[in-house]
Image (cartoon, helix red, strand yellow):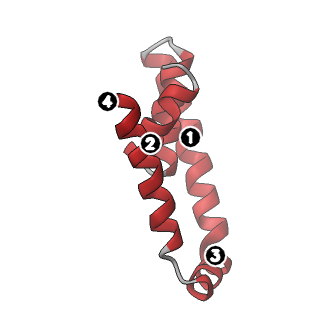
Amino acid sequence: MHRIGQRALQIAVVLIGLNLDIEQLIASSVEYSALVSACVVMTLVVGLALGSLIYDNRKYNFLVSSGTAICGGTVVASLSTTIGA
């Protein structure tokens, strides 16, 4: 059942991406790409640093930090099996 839920989540993320208008995507990418990239990197770095101070398991620290930095629960669910967490 876990595999079915994970696959459904991955398909849902792809379908959400297909719903985007290419012109809107390009316009917003040019305008916000630097800010979004900086926020993602900063959140990832801070999350990894705090995770190493609080809990000494690199897999889980990476999982939670990347999930928080990118888009939350969707990434955590997708990456958990990839990194074996």
Read off the residue under disc 4: 1
Q: Are marks 4 and 2 in contact (CB under 8 Å)?
A: no
* Whole-percent x, y for residue 60 in the image: 48, 22
Cα distance, mark 1 to mark 2? 25 Å
Q: Is residue 40 above or below residue 53?
A: below
Kindly indicate whether the residue at mark 2 contacts the one at mark 1 (C-beta within 8 angstroms). no
User: Disc 4 marks which amino acid?
Assistant: Met
Q: Residue furthest left?
A: 1
Amino acid bearing label 3:
Ser
Q: CA distance from mark 3 to mark 1?
A: 20 Å
**Disc 4 versus disc 3: distance between alpha carbons?**
37 Å
Q: Nearer the viewer, mark 3 or mark 2?
A: 2
Secondary structure at badge 4 equals loop
Q: Is residue 60 above or below residue 20?
A: above
From the image, state whether disc 3 or disc 1 is nearer to you.
Answer: 3
What is the number of the mark on residue 29?
3
Q: Nearer the viewer, mark 1 or mark 2?
A: 2
SS of the residue at dot 2?
A: helix
Mark 4–mark 1 distance (CA, rounded to whole Å): 30 Å
| 11 vs 76, nearest the viewer | 11
Mark toward the start of the polypeptide (3 vs 1): 3
Closer to the chain start, of discs 4 and 3, is: 4
Residue annotated with mark 2: 7
How far across and how far down the image is residue 17, in percent? 52, 67
The residue labelled by disc 1 is 44
Mark 1 neighbour class, 10 Å CA radius: few under 14, some 14 to 19, many 20 or more: many
Going from the N terminus, do you reach mark 4 or mark 1 first?
4
Task: Specify the quadrant of the image occupied by residue 29.
Answer: bottom right
Left or right of residue 40: residue 72: left
Three-letter amino acid code at disc 1? Answer: Leu
Mark 4 to mark 2: distance in Å?
10 Å
Judged from this view, the residue extending furthest toward the top is: 56
